[in-house]
Image (cartoon, coloured by chain):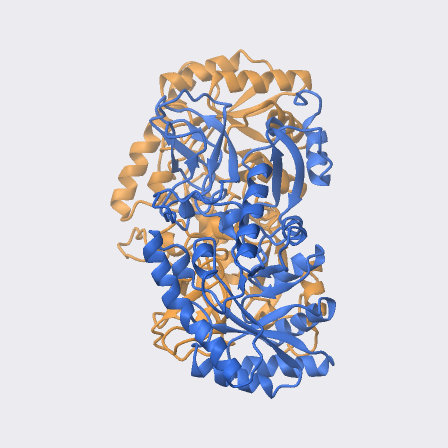
Chain colours: A orange, B blue
Amino acid sequence: MTVATYTWREVDRMLAEGDVKGRLTKADLPTPALIVDLDALEANAQKMIAYVHGTGRAIRPHAKTHKCPEIARYLIASGAVGACAAKLSEAWALAEGGVTGLLVTTAVVGARKIESAIDLARLRPETIFCVDSAQNAGDLNDAAAAAKLTVNVNIDLFVGNRTGIFPGDPAVALAEAIGKLPHLRLAGLQAYAGHASHTVGFDKRRQVSLDAMTPAADTRRALEAKGIACPLLTGGSTGTYNIDTAIDGLNELQPGSFLFMDVDYNRIGSQSGDEFYGDFRNSLFVLTTVVSKPKKEQPVVDAGLKSFSTDKPWPPRWRGGDGLIYNFAGDEHGRLMQPAVPVEVGDRLEFVIPHCDPTVNLYDRLYVLRGDQVEAVWRVAGRGKAQ
Amino acid sequence: MTVATYTWREVDRMLAEGDVKGRLTKADLPTPALIVDLDALEANAQKMIAYVHGTGRAIRPHAKTHKCPEIARYLIASGAVGACAAKLSEAWALAEGGVTGLLVTTAVVGARKIESAIDLARLRPETIFCVDSAQNAGDLNDAAAAAKLTVNVNIDLFVGNRTGIFPGDPAVALAEAIGKLPHLRLAGLQAYAGHASHTVGFDKRRQVSLDAMTPAADTRRALEAKGIACPLLTGGSTGTYNIDTAIDGLNELQPGSFLFMDVDYNRIGSQSGDEFYGDFRNSLFVLTTVVSKPKKEQPVVDAGLKSFSTDKPWPPRWRGGDGLIYNFAGDEHGRLMQPAVPVEVGDRLEFVIPHCDPTVNLYDRLYVLRGDQVEAVWRVAGRGKAQ
């Protein structure tokens, strides 16, 4: 045990500098702390990559889940073609962390952001940007022309309920317009169906995803029938990885949550019929400390609305089983209602997070564990990078 | 207009360095951006401080709302006695930003955190920490003794539904125990009734708050009847500022949200009977950009679950009126359902946030505006400091 060896200041400095391997254990971490079970994370990554490669598809995992260059680089070293970024500022955080093969999945709108996108294309020429309107494509082309660059673009298709242009004729017309813009190169199509990924029940999810994605695959074929090269159709999620990889024409998957999993994904049901979706292991937890016990039946931990995502109806789930039920108790605290196991002030308890992406976005650091040993501290470089 | 004058890199550098006054306007800011209407913020601060002082009470506003040393220092310069911090790491962020008169409102539990608390007490001897058990008081006393310091403590009372020790006999017994610990000095009592602050309807809210706070005032009198000095009873909120300041014995208020306000507080109803609680002005907004328009009736802005709090059932509210209804559309986006006003890609729209504290916690910077001019960029130094 290293616990007694260091003062707080020494631990704090080690954590800030990342110089921790073999020196610190989980007991040294200040709570609330976002911790990663590295064995589980690696198992999830290897399983997903092997599965996708087994179907003859490429994988470009979405980094909006982890926002962490170390993880993106590990995935690329394990066979991924690159990393997706939700926004331009997130892409920059990844690029500056050495990540290649970036796909920015939201259209870049506004003169200043387009200027920044061109800078990124200069640094990482393989980067793909998304466009969903002729106006935006024209703006991007003009900026690329001024910089004497050619920029790769995907057409973002509206196959879910969020952004994009309708598949079919509108998308084909946009592809034709892009073909006339000398500083854009059509990389392909993006089709993300967020409503499919969390549909509960495998058969229903399969149907929702196929209904959403088939028009995207049809659009790719329509482009090729017109002689318009469309090398890429990228989409899919942790919930649909074993559905979308069977779609003829989809050749790249962009899942993210499989690395960490969360309470929300655990409830969508597996292909085998299990209610609990356990295709991938829970690898991400918030480590908390019991800081007050006003009543025997209501101990309080030090993690609340600012330490867990709150966009889903499910609360954090105790890692230890069914004996503790967490209830939010304001910004900074959570109540453990009627605990079925003994809980004392000072106890440290771990919880599965409700929704991984917005939870990671609350933290500056991921503490990476092998068992109880702190293996590394990774900076969440993309935290807050929603621009 | 300064918009056309600078490149993105120049703007980005100015924003990072805070060297913006007179050089940038709102149109220069990368979205999503957290913006503050400084006129409204100042009006809120002056109104609250004048009101509380008018009742003969002190005010120590809670910095968990803004997490920003500049704001805490402004409030102190305007008459506040200091600033509350929810957690020790937040208190450190304030102390390092030059803030004095700190009160840490959650008990500090665990050897390492107590060590850090002692360091803070050395730097800022006037700091008050909260305790709610004899064990924790003893631990803090031992660490203070080792450091040859005397540390100020409040007893945290369980008057809401969160942390603390029960008022009355249990609290009196703890005060007596503290009296025997030579390195602790009893500063007083803390009584925060979070359930009262958001009770809808003034009369009901008044009753809930009085029911919660009266036992705290009684405890202060019980201590004094035993000859135990109890200089401070601190509590109250933006929802109960004009209720708790009438409680005999409560001599310090610790509200936070009055500075910014939010959708959630706007709905609790005012003393005059208005459904809309408008005692303080909305001063905090998220500036967004319309980035996609897949359908005329469903334009999409670039701010979603990672840019707004999601712990309340109410969505962000358009600053411009009733013509736009925001719906969350995932981590990075929001849909504007059936807009009653024209909305085009590239438009910039501002939204009142649902809940101010966890929203501020998502951002690294507050952009401070006078009208459309960027007056300053303040770092949210306590962002993510939940430890």
In depth, the one of A24 and B371 nearer the eye is B371
Q: At 46% across and 77% down in the image, what residue appears?
A: B219
Q: At 58% across and 37% down in the image, what residue appears?
A: B39
Q: Quick check: can you spot residue A383?
A: no
In depth, the one of A83 and A378 nearer the eye is A378
Tell me if residue B310 comes above or below residue A2 in the rendering: above
In depth, the one of A28 and B314 nearer the eye is B314
Tell me if residue B72 comes above or below residue B232 in the rendering: above
Tell me if residue B3 comes above or below residue B276 in the rendering: above
Q: Position of residue A338 (x, y in %)?
A: 33, 73
Q: Quick check: can you spot residue B327?
A: yes
Task: Name which quarter of the figure residue A129 lies in.
Answer: top right
Q: Position of residue B379 (x, y in %)?
A: 65, 46
Relative to B345, A365 lies left or right: right
Quadrant containing the C terminus of chain A in the rendered view: top right
In depth, the one of B179 and A333 nearer the eye is B179
